[in-house]
Image (cartoon, helix red, strand yellow):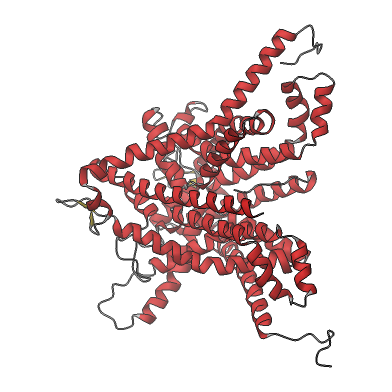
C-alpha cells in the first residue's frame, strides 16, 4: 500500500515551496493594493474638481494643476508626432525592405540599448543636445524631442511585431496584382496592423505620462497657462509628474496625492484601453 | 499621393520616384536609432571626461570626500558609486526571489482567473510613475524604517538617526519597482520551455514542484538571467523614486545611513551646480552610462549564448 501511486508521498519541500510561491504572488498583488489603496485613501478626501480647473497662484490664493495637465497633453501629442513616423517607418524598413542581416542586427542592438538607457541619462542628453546645442532651452519641445528618442523602441518594436503577424499571402497578393511596394504597405500592411501600432502608441503614452527624470532638465517645471497655443511649445512647462515631485519636496502632500490620483486614473485608463484593443484585435504587445 | 491610374505603364516614372523616396525615408527612420545611440554615447563622453582630466581620475573616482561647494572643493564620488552598487545588489537580492516565485506561479501553477488578476496587477505596477513610488516611499516605507531604526539603535548615541530616509528604504522601493520587469521576463522565459520536458518529468514521478525547480528552471536559465540583468539596469537607473527616500547624504552605504545614489546625485545638484561641479555631475552621468553599457553587453552575451544552445 505504501508504494501505491494513488497515495502520493507528501514532501515537506514541496509544501514549503508552494507556500512561498503563493506568498510571493500574494505579496505582489498586496503591494499594488496598498499603493492604490493608499493613494485613494489620501487623495479622495482632499480631491476637489477645482484642482483640475485652477492655476497655482499666490496672488489669487488658488491651488490647481490645470497648467500641468495641459503641459502633459502638449508633451504627449508632440512626442508622439515626432516618434510615431520615425518608429513606424523604421519598423517598416526592418521588416519589409532591409536585406542586409548585419544592418538589421545593428539596428536591433541599438534599439535594445535605447530601451535600456535610464531616463536620467536621456534627461542629461536632452538638456545638452536639444536644450543647449540646438538652442531650444528649457521648453516643451526639448522635452518632447528627448522623450521621442526614449519611446522610439516601444513604438518600433510593437509595429514590427504587428507587421510580422501579417500573413505573407497578403503581401504576395497585393504585389501580384500589380501594386507597388509602397502602395502595398500603405493600403494593405498598415491598415491590417493598425491595432498593433495603436497598442504601441498607448503603451508609449503611458510611459510619457509617467516620465519625470528625463523632463526635469529638459521641459522644466514652470506651471502657467499657455499664453499662445503655438508658441507654448517653446516655453518651459512642467508636467504632472514634475509638479508632483515639486509639491512632494515642499511637503504639500495633499496636492501631491491629488496629482498622484490623477496620474493613477490616467495610467489605469490607458491600461484598460490597451487591453481593450489587444482583446478585440488579438494583438501581441511588446512591453520594453 | 492617391494615384488614380494604377497602370504600371502610364505612371512608371512618378511611381518609381515615389517608391525610391519611400525606401530612402524608411531607411532614414531605421537609422535614427543608431544615430541616437551614437550621439548619446558621444555626448556623455564629451561632457563627462573634462572633469576627469581637470581633477584627475583618481581624485574623482577613488576619493571618498564629496564637498563640491567648499572653498577647497573635493569631488570624490567613490561612496556614491559604492552606494549604487550595494543598493542595486541588495534590491536584486530582495526582488529576485519574490519576482521569480511570482513568475513561476504565473507560468506554471495559476489557473485562468488567478492569472488574469496577477497579470493585470503586474501591468499596473509597471505603469505607476516613479514619482508616485517616491511619494509612497516617503509616507509609508520611511516611517516604518524609522521605527525599525529606533528599535535597533535604541540608546545608541553614536548613530546618526535618519528618520527613515536611508539605504534600506531606498532598497525596498527599488525592489518593488523592478518586480514587474523581473516577473514579465522570467514568465516569458518559463513559458518558452517546451511542454515535453514537464510531461517527461511528471511521467517519471516527479512532483510539480520538483519539475519546476529541477527541470523547468534550469531550462529557462538564460531567460531568467536576462530578467535579472534587466532588473539591475532598471534599478541602477532609477532616480525620482529614491531621490527623497534615500536621504541624500554622501556616506558609506550601511543600511541605516542616509545615502546618495549616482542618479540622485545628478538630479539633486544639477539645478544649481556650475563650473567644475557641473562637469563632475556629468562625469557621474558617464559612470552611470558605462554601467548601463556593461549591463547591455552582458545581456547581449546571455542572449547570444542562449541562441547557440537552442
At 74% from the left and 60% from the top, the residue drawn is B194
Q: Is residue A152 left or right of residue B11?
A: left
Relative vertical location of residue A86 with respect to residue A279 in this rendering, above or below: above
- Visible residue check, residue A66: yes
- At 69% from the left edge and 47% from the top edge, which residue is drawn? A285
Q: Tell which of B14 and A80 is nearer to you.
A: B14
Instruction: Give the total number of marks visible in the rendering.
Output: 0
Residue nearest the observer in this picture, A252 or A234: A234
Quarter of the image with the N terminus of chain A is: bottom right
Instruction: State the image coordinates of residue A245 (x, y, percent, origin top left).
Output: 44, 52
Name the residue rendered at 45%, 29% in the picture.
A234
The outermost residue toward the bottom is: A1
Q: Can you see residue A63?
A: no
The reply, left or right, for residue A218 in relation to residue B309 is left
**Residue A166: percent from left, percent from top:** 77, 37
Q: Is residue A250 left or right of residue A188?
A: left
Q: Which residue sits at x=37%, y=54%?
A: B262
Q: Position of residue A247 (x, y in %)?
A: 43, 53
Amino acid at each position: 500500500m505504501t508504494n501505491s501511486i494513488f497515495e502520493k508521498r507528501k514532501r515537506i519541500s514541496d509544501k514549503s515551496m508552494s507556500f512561498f510561491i503563493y506568498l510571493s504572488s500574494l505579496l505582489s498583488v498586496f503591494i499594488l493594493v496598498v499603493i492604490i489603496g493608499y493613494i485613494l485613501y489620501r487623495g479622495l478626501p482632499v480631491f476637489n474638481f477645482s484642482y483640475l480647473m485652477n492655476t497655482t497662484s499666490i496672488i489669487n490664493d488658488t491651488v490647481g494643476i490645470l497648467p500641468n495637465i495641459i503641459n502633459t497633453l502638449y508633451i504627449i501629442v508632440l512626442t508622439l508626432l515626432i516618434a510615431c513616423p520615425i518608429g513606424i517607418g523604421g519598423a517598416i524598413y526592418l521588416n519589409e525592405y532591409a536585406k542586409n542581416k548585419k544592418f538589421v542586427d545593428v539596428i536591433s542592438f541599438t534599439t535594445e540599448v535605447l530601451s535600456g538607457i535610464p531616463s536620467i541619462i536621456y534627461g542629461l542628453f536632452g538638456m545638452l543636445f536639444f536644450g543647449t546645442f540646438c538652442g531650444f532651452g528649457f521648453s516643451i519641445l526639448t522635452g518632447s524631442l528627448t522623450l521621442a528618442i526614449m519611446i522610439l523602441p516601444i513604438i518600433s518594436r510593437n509595429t514590427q511585431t504587428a507587421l510580422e503577424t501579417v500573413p505573407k499571402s497578403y503581401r504576395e497578393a497585393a504585389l501580384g496584382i500589380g501594386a507597388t511596394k509602397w502602395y502595398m504597405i500603405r493600403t494593405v500592411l498598415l491598415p491590417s496592423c493598425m491595432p498593433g501600432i495603436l497598442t504601441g502608441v498607448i503603451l508609449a503614452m503611458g510611459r510619457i505620462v509617467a516620465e519625470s527624470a528625463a523632463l526635469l532638465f529638459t521641459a522644466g517645471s514652470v506651471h502657467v497657462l499657455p499664453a499662445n497655443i503655438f508658441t507654448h511649445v517653446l516655453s518651459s512647462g512642467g508636467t504632472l509628474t514634475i509638479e508632483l515631485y515639486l509639491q512632494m519636496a515642499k511637503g504639500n502632500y495633499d496636492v501631491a496625492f491629488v496629482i498622484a490620483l490623477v496620474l493613477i486614473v490616467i495610467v489605469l485608463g490607458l491600461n484598460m484601453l490597451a487591453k481593450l484593443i489587444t482583446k478585440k484585435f488579438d494583438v501581441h504587445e511588446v512591453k520594453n | 499621393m492617391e494615384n488614380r491610374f494604377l497602370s504600371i505603364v502610364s505612371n512608371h516614372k512618378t511611381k518609381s520616384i515615389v517608391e525610391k523616396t519611400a525606401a530612402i525615408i524608411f531607411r532614414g527612420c531605421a537609422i535614427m536609432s543608431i544615430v541616437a545611440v551614437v550621439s548619446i554615447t558621444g555626448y556623455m563622453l564629451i561632457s563627462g571626461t573634462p572633469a576627469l582630466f581637470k581633477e584627475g581620475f583618481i581624485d574623482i573616482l577613488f576619493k571618498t570626500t564629496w564637498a563640491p561647494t567648499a572653498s577647497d572643493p573635493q569631488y570624490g564620488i567613490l561612496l556614491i558609486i559604492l552606494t549604487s552598487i550595494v543598493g542595486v545588489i541588495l534590491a536584486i537580492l530582495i526582488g529576485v526571489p519574490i519576482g521569480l516565485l511570482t513568475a513561476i506561479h504565473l507560468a506554471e501553477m495559476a489557473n485562468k482567473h488567478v492569472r488574469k488578476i496577477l497579470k493585470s496587477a503586474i501591468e499596473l505596477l509597471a505603469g505607476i510613475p516613479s514619482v508616485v513610488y517616491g511619494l509612497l516611499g516617503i509616507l509609508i516605507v520611511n516611517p516604518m524604517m524609522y521605527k525599525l531604526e529606533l528599535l535597533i539603535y535604541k540608546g545608541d548615541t553614536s548613530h546618526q538617526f535618519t528618520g527613515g530616509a536611508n539605504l534600506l528604504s531606498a532598497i525596498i522601493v527599488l525592489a518593488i519597482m523592478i518586480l514587474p520587469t523581473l516577473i514579465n521576463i522570467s514568465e516569458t522565459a518559463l513559458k518558452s520551455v517546451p511542454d515535453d520536458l514537464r510531461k517527461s518529468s511528471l511521467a517519471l514521478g516527479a512532483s510539480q514542484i520538483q519539475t519546476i525547480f529541477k527541470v523547468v528552471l534550469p531550462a529557462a536559465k538564460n531567460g531568467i538571467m536576462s530578467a535579472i540583468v534587466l532588473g539591475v539596469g532598471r534599478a541602477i537607473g532609477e532616480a525620482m523614486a529614491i531621490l527623497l527616500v534615500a536621504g541624500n547624504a554622501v556616506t558609506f552605504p550601511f543600511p541605516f545611513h542616509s545615502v546618495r545614489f549616482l542618479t540622485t546625485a545628478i538630479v539633486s545638484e544639477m539645478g544649481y551646480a556650475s563650473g567644475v561641479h557641473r562637469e563632475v555631475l556629468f562625469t557621474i552621468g558617464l559612470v552611470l552610462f558605462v554601467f548601463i553599457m556593461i549591463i547591455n553587453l552582458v545581456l547581449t552575451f546571455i542572449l547570444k549564448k542562449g541562441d547557440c544552445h537552442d
